[in-house]
Image (spheres, helix red, strand yellow):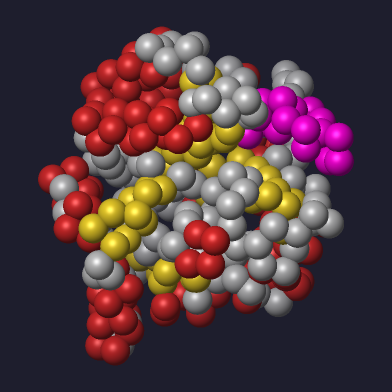
Amino acid sequence: MIHFIFTLDYEIYGNGKGSLKELIIQPTDKILKIFSKYNDKLVIFAECAEFIKIKEYNTDPDIEKLNDQLYQAYLMQHEIGLHLHPQWINSIYTEQNWKLDFTKVNIAKLTESERDNLIYESIFYLKEVLMDKNYNPSSFRSGLWLMQPTSPIYESLKKYNIKIDSSLFREGYHHNNGLDFRSSLHNKKVFWPFISDINLYDESGLVIEIPIYSEMVWFFRLLTKNRIKSTGKRPSFESKKSIKAKLVDKMDFFRLKYPKKFDFTKLTFEELCQMTISINNKYGNINDHIPIVLIGHSKNSFNPETIDKFLAYLNNFSNINICTFKDFFNLTSTREKFGTINTGIKIR
């Protein structure tokens, strides 16, 4: 059985620009309604670092509406995962603008106390929002997908009993940020435990990597109308980078081949169908549980009709199931080593 796991990065822009209503609440409401129509569930990766700061400085009147949306999604059995952009740690709001600390952009390079405080405060925030003192995130995605050096962040995830990471996409490479997933292409596992290197299988690891599904394509195949439209609306903090850093960024992207992520908020309906057929041809006859992680962003400029049509299209496949990380984890043999994940909901 193939299991499609839809994940949504629930956040505003990485430089602090944008409103909660326009970039998170309204688009997520559209997605939740579509998933409810098909009785499907998704994983919402809540970027708590920014929500904590927005609430602290009272910069957006819709923060309580956002919290209520998260709570309602939790009651509807959608999974709430943890997503963190640590540049918010030392942020301050002044002269109607956020000043973020981009020296802290890589969570794996924070000090142990910085990282522990960030994760602890974020989990505590979600416990209050979800009104569940027993809540603990089962899944994690790092801001900008940064998980290297791996050992420090592995230890933190283990400490807080977070059993699943989904930050890696095969052959991902961003030189300036220290992201290098290229060696993962040689890892033949579909998902795997890790410790010191997120790219590599380590049977003694207590955290599992379930990667974002991607396919290597010629770089010009990424220059689609949907992607250009989405990128064009996104404010950038490129001006803070040196000319050399900007040049390296461009070189990283314009490799001859580049990983095309299974993005349900960027790809066209035709692209989504093509990737589904490719996945089905590859894994459809395997007698095992195969997780396929799709990624999306609430802040992307997406067409709800595309998502609706795609969920309807997936109903044509008897061997494709839609589930959350929790559901998948409890289905697979990982439970023999890691135990099950509590899927119960505590209401008020």
Residue depicted at 42% across the width and 78% down the height = 175
Q: Position of residue 238 (x, y in %)?
A: 28, 74
Q: Nearer the viewer, residue 38 or 242?
A: 38
Query: Which quadrant of the view contains residue 79?
Result: top right
Decide whether residue 72 is among the magenta residues: no
Say whether residue 143 is left or right of residue 243: right
User: Would you say the magenta stretch is mainly helix, strand or loop?
Assistant: helix
> What percent of the width, then of the height, locates residue 142?
56, 57
User: In what quadrant of the picture does the C terminus appear?
Assistant: top right
**Residue at horizontal 31 percent and vertical 81 percent from the top:** 248
- Looking at the image, residue 346 lies above or below residue 111: above
Residue toward you, 58 or 88: 88
- Is residue 261 found left or right of 120 in the rendered image? left
Residue 249 rendering spot, x and y as whole percentages? 31, 75
Where residue 100 sits, quadrant-wise, is bottom left
Q: Is residue 249 visible?
A: yes
Q: Is residue 10 left or right of residue 209?
A: left
Instruction: Give the total of numbered labels.
Output: 0
Horizontal and vertical percent position of residue 13? 36, 55
The residue furthest front is 285
Q: Nearer the viewer, residue 302 or 171?
A: 171
Q: For residue 264, say whether it is visible.
A: no
Q: Looking at the image, which residue sits at the far left?
A: 225
Q: Residue at x 49, y 21 (%)?
A: 320
Q: Quadrant of residue 268?
A: top left
User: Looking at the figure, which quarter contains the N terminus?
Assistant: top right
* Magenta-colored span: 324-342
Viewer-proximal residue among 273 and 147: 273
As drawn, 47 above or below 24: below
128 lies left or right of 84? right
Please report the residue visible at 55 percent of the width from the left and 71 percent of the height from the top. Answer: 106
